[in-house]
Image: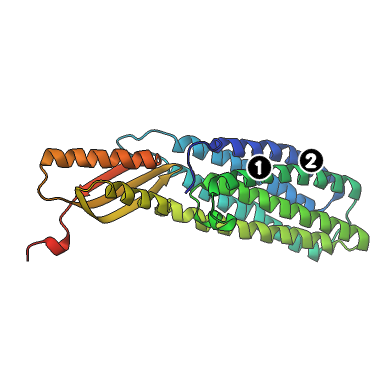
Amino acid sequence: MSSESGHASPTAHIIQSLLANLGIVIAKGIAAAFTGSGAMLAETIHSFADCGNQLLLLMGVKRAAAPPDPSHPLGYGRNLYFWSFMVALLLFVGGGVFSVYEGIHKIGEPEPVENLAVGLVVLGISLALEGWSTLSNIREINKRRGPKGFFRYLVDTKDSDLIVVFGENSAAVLGLGFAFAAMLLASATGDGRWDGAGSLLIGLVLIGVAVFLAVEVKSLLVGESADPGVEAAARAAAGEDPRITRVLNCITVQQGPGEVLVAIKIAVDEAIAVNELCRLINELEVRLRSARPDARWVFVEPDIPRDRLPT
């Protein structure tokens, strides 16, 4: 997991993508009206949906930062996972399904593409803006993933906001490439079905990205274990105290960005007094939080191993 300190604010990459998409959706909408291109219309709807999605993510980041209260003693961190899941659903329906429908419609009832130059210029500008935003996401991912492989990080990470934005932006770049090629082919051949095929491909890309994001975020939403490094740090912190004879069990749960719950059951020297045991537990918690600042909640339970229980 990679919500360590020193990384960019969770809102920075979201706002960056939102500002880029606001400009893009206006340009694409004008170009779609001038060219009559189904692929361009699909890209306009896609960018408009992305703007709404990024507003939802910003709301999720804000709500996830709310402090714990009696009704939510472990805080509201999973709010971000909920809104990330909603973004995946909207990307599927608002972008993917509509683009597939538009593509099938244009293949069945092809129309000529007009004002090709306007469409290509807008697509080129949009591709530059989306590419800039995507490269920014990739740089941030590279900072966070450490030695872990890029695609392995995408599967394992708990940073749902960054991955959702990266998924949207990378899908947009690929979709723009399809739209560019579709308009060129439709104009060169005089066959409007190429334009419809471009819209169809854009829709399939969006659906594929949306399904991937939904599967990944759903796992976090229902309660996924934290990065293995958290458990390793907990066991290492316990191993530093000779009075702790064994770690019997350790459970970690990702509660939100940079917020992990750790429950650890330990066996201790039976000769120590209660006061000493309390100090031991407090010292263990301090060592763990020092090693892993994302261990926000730490619960330590002393117990007797089963092999030492009286028969």
Is residue 159 found left or right of 284 in the rendered image?
A: right
Q: Is residue 98 above or below residue 60?
A: below
User: Looking at the figure, which quarter contains the C terminus?
Assistant: bottom left
Judge whether residue 274 can be spotted in this image.
yes
Disc 2 marks which residue? 27
Depth check, front residue: 80 or 139: 139
Left or right of 280? Residue 187 is right
Residue 136 image label: 1
Foreground of the two, 28 or 8? 8
Going 51% across and 46% down the picture, which residue do you hit? 159
At x 11%, y 41%, the residue is 274
Question: What distance separates the C-alpha of mark 1 from that of mark 2?
Answer: 22 Å
Q: Position of residue 13 (x, y in %)?
A: 61, 39
Whether residue 115 is visible, yes or no, is no
Scheme of image coloration: rainbow
Residue at 19% over, 47% down: 243
Where is residue 56 shown, x and y percent of the image? Answer: 55, 41
Q: Position of residue 298 (x, y in %)?
A: 30, 43
Task: Label 1: state its secondary structure.
Answer: helix
Q: How many residues crowd mark 1 within 10 Å: few (<14), some (14–19), many (20+)?
A: some
